[in-house]
Image (cartoon, rainbow, N blue to C red):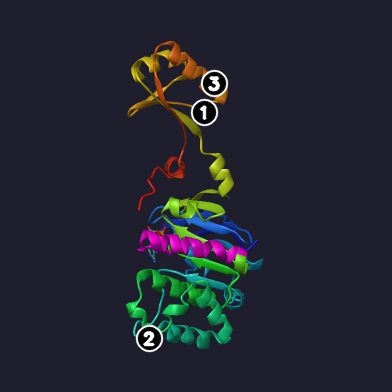
Amino acid sequence: MIVSTENLSKEYDGIYRVNDLDIQIDEGDIYGFLGPNGAGKSTTMKMLLGLVKPSKGSIEIMGKSFNEKNRQEILKSVGSLIESPSYYGHLTGRENMEIIRRLLGLPRKNIEEAVHIVRMEKQMDKKVKNYSLGMKQRLGIAMALARRPKLLVLDEPTNGLDPAGIEEMRELVKTLPTKYGMTVMISSHILSEVDQMATVVGIINHGELIFQENMSVLDAQRQPYIILRTSDNNLACQILRNMNPLRTGDGLQLGALSDEQTGKVVQNLCANDIAVYRVEEHRESLEDIFLNLTGKEMTL
Ligand SMILES: Nc1ncnc2c1ncn2[C@@H]1O[C@H](COP(=O)(O)OP(=O)(O)OP(=O)(O)O)[C@@H](O)[C@H]1O
């Protein structure tokens, strides 16, 4: 286990903004930490990095209790990007990386590797103030990677990026466990972003962890349903009334059906002179599941 918390909580002004979190992150996971704005993601991540002191509960990182005594030692193996990366805009990427290297006393090859992972080799002689937002984020990640962390904690790294930047970030994060043996915790308030890279999802709402499972479990919860479009949806609805159809836009919706059941439905409609234009199988989107869990839409 790379991260394990027990009853992790933070109180601000008499209110528990993070409440009794039991987070479990295994080695090699990409842990998507999802929740609407203000749910408590940043506060949780800051506690995991020793930047905010928990009001209650405990944290273990890489099997060691995360306390005053162990903190510095543990953080040597943890890289992070919280809020916007800190860099000197008037210096080049290379100069910024050199500052990090000296601060942490790292060998040069660590810097080369970190820059290579984020594919920024060609941008290193440009001043950071001339970087795009995506490049700045990548430089921030390179800074976090320089110490070759076992655990990388990224707080909303795609905030403000355009779709191409988001895609790039996703592809980058996906390579980290397989190619470099890292474990990644990445927060977002956009489900679709995490959906395509996370192996485990933790969903936090009002400071509480309301879901924590492998992505495959979340996928399995997505209910399939059938949408039919016919020449006479009203009549079709009547004919199929024992299947409790729902009217949707220009069609009707039935629950999950086997191939055989679908065949019978089509036969039945044809026998009643109704032409079947479309039979489509849909699955509940992850957004729908999230909405059911939190009562809030996951929007950009
Ligand atoms: N230092 C603080 N003092 C008082 N309240 C705080 C402090 N830091 C955070 N909070 C409150 O705790 C709650 C959770 O904030 P947090 O930043 O952890 O949420 P978040 O899920 O990261 O959201 P966002 O994506 O908007 O940053 C919010 O209601 C916030 O106002």
Q: Is mark 1 within 8 Å of ligand 1?
A: no
Q: Is residue 261 left or right of residue 12?
A: right
Give the image quarter of residue 168: bottom left
Q: Quadrant of the N terminus?
A: bottom right
- SS of the residue at dot 3? helix
Query: 172 or 183, which lies in front?
Result: 172
- SS of the residue at dot 2? loop
First in residue order: circle 2 vs circle 1:
2
Query: 43 or 287, which lies in front?
Result: 287
Residue 75 in sight in this render: yes
- Specify the segment rendered in magenta: 157-178
Above or below residue 140? Residue 291 is above
Identify residue type, mark 3: Gln
First in residue order: circle 3 vs circle 2:
2
Give the image quarter of residue 41: bottom left
Percent x, y of residue 217: 58, 44
- How far apart marks 3 and 1 lie (CA) works out to 9 Å
Percent x, y of residue 252: 39, 25
Other residues around mark 3 within 10 Å, as few (<14) / some (14–19) / many (≥20): few
Query: 103 or 53, which lies in front?
Result: 103
* Dot label at residue 261: 3
Identify residue type, mark 1: Ala
Q: Does the magenta portion include 166?
A: yes
Percent x, y of residue 66: 60, 69
Residue placed under numbered mark 2 in the picture: 91
Q: Does the magenta portion include 257?
A: no
Residue placed under numbered mark 1 in the picture: 256
Q: Nearer the viewer, mark 3 or mark 2?
A: 3
Identify residue type, mark 2: Leu
- Pointers 3 and 2 in contact (CB under 8 A)? no
First in residue order: circle 3 vs circle 1:
1
- Pointers 2 and 1 in contact (CB under 8 A)? no
